[in-house]
Amino acid sequence: MKDALETLGQIIDGDEGRDAVHIAVISVKNTLQMTLSPGQNIRVDNDGLAPILYGDRNAVVDPFLKDSVKNGEFFWAFLYPRTTTGLKHVWKHPDFDESNELYENVMDTIAGNQPARKFLEETARGIGEEVEVVISNATDFQYHGTTWNGGENFMDAYADDEFWDAWQKVTGKTAKDRSNFFRCAC
């Protein structure tokens, strides 16, 4: 009997019974000027942030979604089975707080990212945004040159070397352009 991971994406005999699988997923922002359908085959770029509709596909838009993914919305992209070289598991236990924030803070501390994450959180709080939105817009700037216009909220916002150092530590990516991407349009 083959396990399910070996046969995902194939027609099966029907006598396999039951199994459970782990599939790697990554949070992706639809940066395309079109909607994406649940189950649509896409390529996630090297940054893991944007879907691409050319080249070899490596992922599927969350097939469990009830609606299409509009431009600017985030979704889970399921990486093709048997393509990852490592997989991290998150577990639950009644003796431990299962909030995602606690888990992320522990993982950040283990990875040495706690001060960097806090710096980005303070930056986000100062402009009235969520830290994930700041990280996503900073990443869009790094890989697509997109500046972020925020009106009066961005009058005192500035991405300097300290900001880009924190972004690098939290994302594991390299800041090639260390200029300010915040624009107040004042």
Image: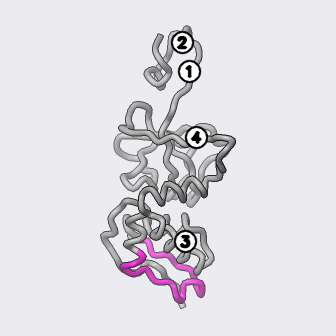
* Helix, strand or loop at mark 3: helix
The C terminus: image quadrant: bottom right
Give the mark toward the camera: 3 or 2.
Answer: 3
Label 3 packing within 10 angstroms: few (<14), some (14-19), many (20+) = some
Mark-to-mark CA distance, 1 and 4: 18 Å
Residue 17 or 40: which is nearer the viewer? 17
Give the mark toward the camera: 4 or 2.
Answer: 4
The residue at the far front in this view is 95
Note whether residue 185 is visible: no
Give whichever of discs 3 and 2 has the lower sequence position: 2
Mark-to-mark CA distance, 2 and 1: 8 Å
Residue 31: give its label: none
Give whichever of discs 1 and 3 has the lower sequence position: 1
Label 3–label 2 contact, CB within 8 A? no
x 46%, y 20%: residue: 7
Mark-to-mark CA distance, 3 and 2: 47 Å
Amino acid type assigned to the residue bearing label 2 in the image = Glu
Label 1 packing within 10 angstroms: few (<14), some (14-19), many (20+) = few
Residue 32 at what x, y percent from top left? Answer: 49, 57
Amino acid type assigned to the residue bearing label 4 in the image = Trp
* Helix, strand or loop at mark 2: loop
Report the span colored magenta: 146-163
The residue at the far bottom in this view is 186
List the residue tagged with mark 1. Answer: 19
Q: Quadrant of residue 116?
A: bottom left
The residue at the far left in this view is 176
Note whether residue 157 is visible: yes
